[in-house]
Image (spheres, coloured by chain):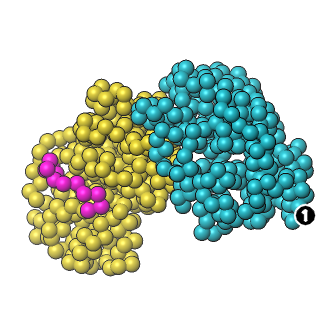
Chain colours: A cyan, B yellow
Amino acid sequence: MKEYNLESLEKFTNQVRRDIVRMVHAQNSGHPGGSLGCVEYFTAIYKVIMNHSTNFSMDGKNEDLFFLSNGHISPVFYSVLARTGYFPVKELNTFRKIDSRLQGHPTTHEGLPGVRVASGSLGQGLSVAIGAATTKKLNKDNSLVYTLHGDGELQEGQIWEAAMYASAKKIDNLISTIDFNGRQIDGDVDDVLSLGNLDEKWKAFGWKTLSCNGNNLQEMIATLETAKGLTGKNQPIMILMKTEMGYGIDFMMGSHKWHGVAPNDEQLELALNQQVESLGDY
Amino acid sequence: MKFEILGNKDTRSGFGDGLTQLGKSNLNVVALCADLTGSLKMNDFKDQFPERFFQVGIAEANMMGIAAGMTIGGKIPFTGTFANFSTSRVYDQVRQSIAYSGKNVKLCASHAGLTLGEDGATHQVLEDIGMMKMLPGMTVINPCDYNQTKAATIAIADYNGPVYLRFGRPKVPIFIPENTPFEIGKALLLQKGTDVSIFATGHLVWEAVEAARALAKEGLSVELINIHTIKPLDNDSILRSVAKTKCVVTAEEHQIAGGMGESIAQLLAISHPVPMEFVAVNDKFGESGKPADLMKKYGLHSSDIIKATHRVLKRK
């Protein structure tokens, strides 16, 4: 396993959480809940797990690729891309503003380094990742492809077309993760449209499944490392990542209400008091 | 041009043969199909290049996403399914994962329009040109015979960007000489004339050829232009012709709304308004039947182009 400094990574997560609430507050628009819940995942893949180059090329040959399928959690994606060196951190200030590369949902259209496909309309990212993974095989490129999905997103039919394809065609250079926070815009996933037993569903579709607490950084990293060890065995891999929507900001946890709502000035201050500035605010 | 009939073949075979040729000449070309390999004439490619052929099953949305992803790393994916399933069924996937994402995917669509015939309106898409031309950055091509479809298939591999290539099921006359260069966005002048400009695309080009012959017997001089690329439209060729003839008939196997004629009308409304008639389907779904019977019933026959020409000349 690649060595890492846990303390330094935890400081990184503090700063990313500050970025998320500040970005969403600044434009009074965006999705803080899911973003906060996935900070450990993004920190793990971009700081520890993936072999990737911040000297961005769309083709990404001989490097690992990441696709964000649930594009609405763009704040965490943008913060981590900026703070790992894909673009200037101060550009986070332009999030959701006119003439920005940081669109509400990620896109290639304005040429933001680190983004390889537009996402926002849900359910499309797994298919795209399968395509990229297939091209890697054709190119004899042994790098891996990672995807992240929301749990509510699994209500889209295209996900299951892709799930079927990936196992039938033995796409085994793909590590997908579901942000299993149990919440979506209208409420709890179980109330909106229950997903049933997700682990059994993915197994029935022919995937190797793993699970972890996605808000425990060490466990997250260990699970992704385990997943890497399971690639190349004729089977796609799915991590069911249990997270808490709004994790790290106490009043944003415990409900679906902060899925797509921005904090006001007072709430921002409360939130920032819970996450220490470690790398300098943008 | 003499309009000699060089044979009789379906345009989809032009696609299949062009794709096989590309398989040999361009190692980055890959093909995906959603359970219609035979109908799309992709069997030769599949047999000759099995490692570059991807059968995705009856899951067109997934196929579009996979195609978008395959471009990352330099592949040039050609997707094959019916026109209806290449457009309306997967509009959001094409819009977000391919067009908005600027991916180099070639959407190859067979069985477009009424000439699909007996399967009926569920499969006879007549709105696909409109849907595809509305997407920013999408190139839309509708070739007219086997030779032009083959040439177009080969040409789009060298163009970097999303393309919608539309062709059809029935055997139709081959009349574009095999060595005719195919230039994306460049209209093909088939016959010079001075009385009326007829702009035709796809299967209606041959109908327009027949109409032009009949009109010549009436002493009328028809300028006949094949608009194989609907987007980007060849504005210069159209305006040059209209400056001379001062009236227009358009002909296509598509709804009037959203079609090639609409694109030309938009151009002329701004740059050179003239009387114009549209030979196309007028806000109706198709139905089962023999292709030739359907073309007559829905007003897409050469006789309809002749009538439209008479109407437009009266308005000139």
The percent position of residue B16, horizontal first and vertical second, equals 28, 37
Q: Is residue B282 visible?
A: no
Residue extent of the magenta highlight: B175-186
Tell me where residue B188 sits by quadrant: bottom left
The percent position of residue B14, horizontal first and vertical second, equals 24, 41
* Left-right relation of A155 to A245: left
* Left-right relation of B64 to B206: right
* Left-right relation of A231 to B138: right
State the residue position of label 1.
A266
Q: Does the magenta run of residues contain A257? A: no
The secondary structure making up most of the magenta span is: loop
The percent position of residue A250, horizontal first and vertical second, equals 90, 48
Identify the residue at image location x=77%, y=53%.
A15
Look at label 1 and name its amino acid: Glu
Identify the residue at image location x=64%, y=22%.
A208
Identify the residue at image location x=29%, y=57%.
B184
* Left-right relation of B242 to B92: left
Identify the residue at image location x=77%, y=39%.
A6
Tell me where residue B30 sits by quadrant: top left
Near-viewer residue (A235 or A83) = A83
